[in-house]
Each structure stands twice: as structure tokens, then as C-alpha cells.
Image (cartoon, grey):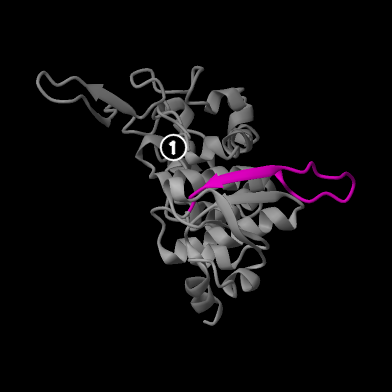
Amino acid sequence: QTPIGKTPRSCPATYVGIWELIRRAFAETSESRLRGYNAARFSFNTGAGRCAVCEGQGLVKLEMSFLPDVRVPCERCGGQRFNAETLGVQLRGLHIGQVLSLSIDDACEFFVNHPKIHHTLRLLQDVGLGYLTLGQHSPTLSGGEAQRIKLVSELAKARPSLTRRQPHTLYLLDEPTVGLHMADVERLIRVLHRLTDLGNTVLVVEHNLDLIAEADWVLDMGPEGGKGGGKIVVQGTPSKVAKAKNSVTAPYLREILQG
């Protein structure tokens, strides 16, 4: 439930782990080698490559006397986070500031020849986050967007291996569909299936019937809410729970399963 970042330095690219790979890609260009730049040059957190005015945040805080402080784009770098020398290095026609401004959909096409980066970007597309930019400041993300980015970071780590057994992980999700559009719920369900297909267990506390209908096993708690609940009324596959006569959930779940 915690945010993925509370400062403008945090963004989707850093959280899912592809920013380091992007920095390496820039460091491997011929222009970087001629200038003697390494991957550290393309960090907006430290080093000589970031903008000295905004210190790599791309934003500058303005203190308002009687109003809350506001953040505006840095005038020196134009919100690009890096100084002019660093922005002089290009990868396939784009400098690193422009890459940060790419939407995930556009970045997926741009990095099609970088398998590790492309794989994670495709996962972000799969959960319906293709409209976000790589460098979007984390404090501007909604709770639902942050939850899906967290799921992608787990999926990116859980790539199947033919040489070694992947560790089994238990994921506990509390109401992950809250605030999501119906289309996004469908994408979330596909992501959860991918986690279980990789041998993991996903335990979800949920009221959304579309998600409940997709579960392998359902524990229907009740019979009432609050002090009148807390007991397992019925458990089993969704089809079994839908047939239960003592379950408040059953008739609604039955409608979902019947289409």
C-alpha cells in the first residue's frame, strides 16, 4: 500500500529497474566513449551529469508566502534533469532527457532491440500503463497505478529459467481493484495469472466479483460483516461457492459465471 516514491527523483523507470540498463545503453554509445563518459554520467541522483540548479529533479520548488509551495520546471535544463554536456549524447537520435519523456508505449518501440528493457516495458503495457512516461514523477501517480507498477517489478524479476528453479513467493494483495476501470481489472487479472503460472501463490482480499470468478480457490467470509462475520461460510472453486445456499456472495457470483 505504500507509495513507490515520495520525491520527484523517483519514477517508473527507476522503480522497475530499467533505468540502470538505459544509462548503460547511453554509456556504450560512441559519443560517450569519446568523451570518457560512463553510466554514472547519466544519473540524475548524483554526479557531474545532472543539472546543477535543480540537482537532477527537473523541478524547482518555489516558496509561497501564504500558499503551499509549488514546483515548476527548472529554467536551466527545461525540466530535462541533465546539463547541456550530458544532453549532447544521443542514442538513436534522442538524448537521455527525451528518453525520460517517452511514454511507455513509445519507449517499448524505441527499445525493441534491447531485450531486458523491452521485456519490462511490455509488462507495463500489459497492466495498462502504456500512457505513463518513463520519467513521470512518482508523487503524481495514483494508488492503482503504483500498485500495478509494483506488480510489474515482481513480474520482471520472476522470469522463468530452464537452468534453476525459481523461488516460490507468496503475494498478499489487499483490494487491488479499488479505483480501477473494468478494463484495468481485466489486465490486473491477467497479471495475477502470470504470477501463479510462474509457481507463485497470490492471496487476494477482494470484493470484485470479476476477480473472484477468476480465482482457483475462494474463501467466502461471513455470514455478516463486522462482529457478525469472521467465519468461513463456504470454500472451494468459484463454481462451488456459487451453488452455496448459505452464502450472500453466491447469487451474485453465479450471475458472473453464467455470463
User: Vertically, is 198 above or below 77?
Assistant: below
Determine the residue positioned at 68% across, 46% down: 116
Q: Is residue 18 magenta?
A: no
Q: Secondary structure at mark 1?
A: helix
Residue 28: percent from the left, percent from the top?
65, 35
Looking at the rendering, the stretch of residues picked out in magenta corresponds to 157-176
Determine the residue positioned at 47% across, 72% down: 252
Q: Nearer the viewer, residue 187 or 18?
A: 187
Residue 229: percent from the left, percent from the top?
49, 50
Left or right of 129: which side holds 28?
Answer: right
Determine the residue positioned at 58% across, 33% down: 23
Residue reaching furthest left? 66
The main secondary structure of the magenta stretch is: loop
Q: Nearer the viewer, residue 85 or 117?
A: 117
User: Vertically, is 254 above or below 172?
Assistant: below
User: Vertically, is 56 above or below 28?
Assistant: above
Quickly name the residue at label 1: 97
Determine the residue positioned at 39% across, 30% down: 8
